[in-house]
């Protein structure tokens, strides 16, 4: 806490001049402090003296309380309540938007998740490995391109669009031949499938498929 001399400015030792004389006696030290607290409190609008007085500021209390001038008034409270209501309305407002036609910038309703789509289908190009007796297994992304699913998807799609599906098929078959997980498979195929989304992705039910390319998995005898 700053001393009274630091608050009022250093004007030498003792209290300011009063009546042409400087008060410096030890007996008047408490009175000097109270007077300085009085001046500081009166100048800033709140008391800084000790004891029960307020330093003769505009506020009430123990000298450390806020003055009445800075207490929140009715207008401030009404304004705060109005701002709160506006913010709450802004938060609740998106709930009333149409999930399909209300999709717009900057707030999206994510319509693909906002309503049921019982007839949703997935049509996609991908790579599978097949074996004798109807064995079948999807080739993972790292054996098609890399570990990124979307990059593997685009690799297959571009190969099909550019009519390079046979080349991609042979490259994937060479990688599959070195992977023990596919020991029971003997063929790789690049195919296009059109499936019911839930049936295919959740229950493994396949829809119609069309092959773009097929190639054998050639394994070395020394592997």
Image (cartoon, rainbow, N blue to C red):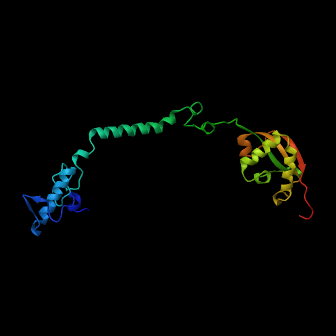
What residue is shown at x 29% (from left), y 38% (from top)? Answer: 75
Looking at the image, the residue that sits furthest to the top is: 101
Q: In the picture provided, is 6 more to the left or to the right than 189?
A: left
Q: The N terminus is located in which quarter?
A: bottom left
In this rendering, position of residue 216 left or right of residue 5 = right
| Count of marks, rendered view | 0
**Horizontal side of residue 109 vs 198, given as left or right:** left
Image coordinates for residue 208, horizontal then vertical, percent: 81, 38
Name the outermost residue toward the bottom. 26
Image height check: is 76 above or below 182? Answer: above
| Residue 33 drawn at (x, y percent) | 16, 62
Asked if 43 appears above or below 20 in the picture, the reply is: above
Report whether 125 appears left or right of 187: left
Is residue 204 visible in this depiction of the protein? Answer: no
Residue 50 locus on image (x, y percent) = 18, 61
> Is residue 35 something one can see in this rendering?
yes
Task: Determine the image quadrant of residue 22.
Answer: bottom left
Residue at far right of view: 221
* Residue at 46 percent of width and 37 percent of height: 90
Q: Quadrant of residue 213?
A: top right
Residue 186 versus residue 201 in the image, above or below: below
Residue 56 vs residue 211, the one in the foreground: 56
In the rendered image, the quadrant that contains the C terminus is bottom right
In-front residue for pair 59/48:
48
Query: Residue, x 72% and y 49% (percent of image)?
Result: 149
């Amino acid at each position: 806490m700053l001393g009274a001399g630091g608050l009022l400015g250093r004007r030498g030792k003792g209290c300011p001049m009063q009546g042409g004389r400087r008060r410096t006696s030890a007996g008047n030290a408490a009175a000097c402090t109270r007077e300085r607290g009085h001046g500081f409190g009166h100048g800033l609008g709140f008391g800084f003296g000790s004891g029960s007085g307020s330093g003769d500021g505009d506020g009430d209390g123990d000298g450390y309380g806020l003055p009445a001038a800075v207490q929140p008034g009715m207008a401030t409270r009404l304004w705060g309540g109005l701002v709160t209501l506006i913010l709450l309305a802004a938060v609740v407002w998106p709930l009333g938007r149409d999930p399909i036609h209300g999709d717009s910038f900057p707030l999206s309703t994510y319509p693909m998740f906002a309503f049921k789509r019982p007839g949703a289908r997935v049509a996609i190009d991908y790579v599978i490995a097949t074996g004798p007796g109807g064995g079948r297994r999807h080739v993972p992304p790292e054996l098609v391109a890399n570990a990124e699913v979307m990059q593997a998807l685009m690799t297959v799609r571009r190969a099909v669009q550019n009519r390079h599906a046979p080349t991609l098929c042979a490259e994937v078959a060479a990688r599959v031949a070195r992977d023990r997980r596919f020991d029971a498979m003997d063929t790789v195929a690049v195919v296009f499938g059109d499936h019911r989304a839930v049936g295919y992705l959740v229950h493994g039910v396949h829809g119609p498929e069309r092959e773009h390319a097929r190639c054998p998995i050639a394994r070395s005898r020394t592997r």
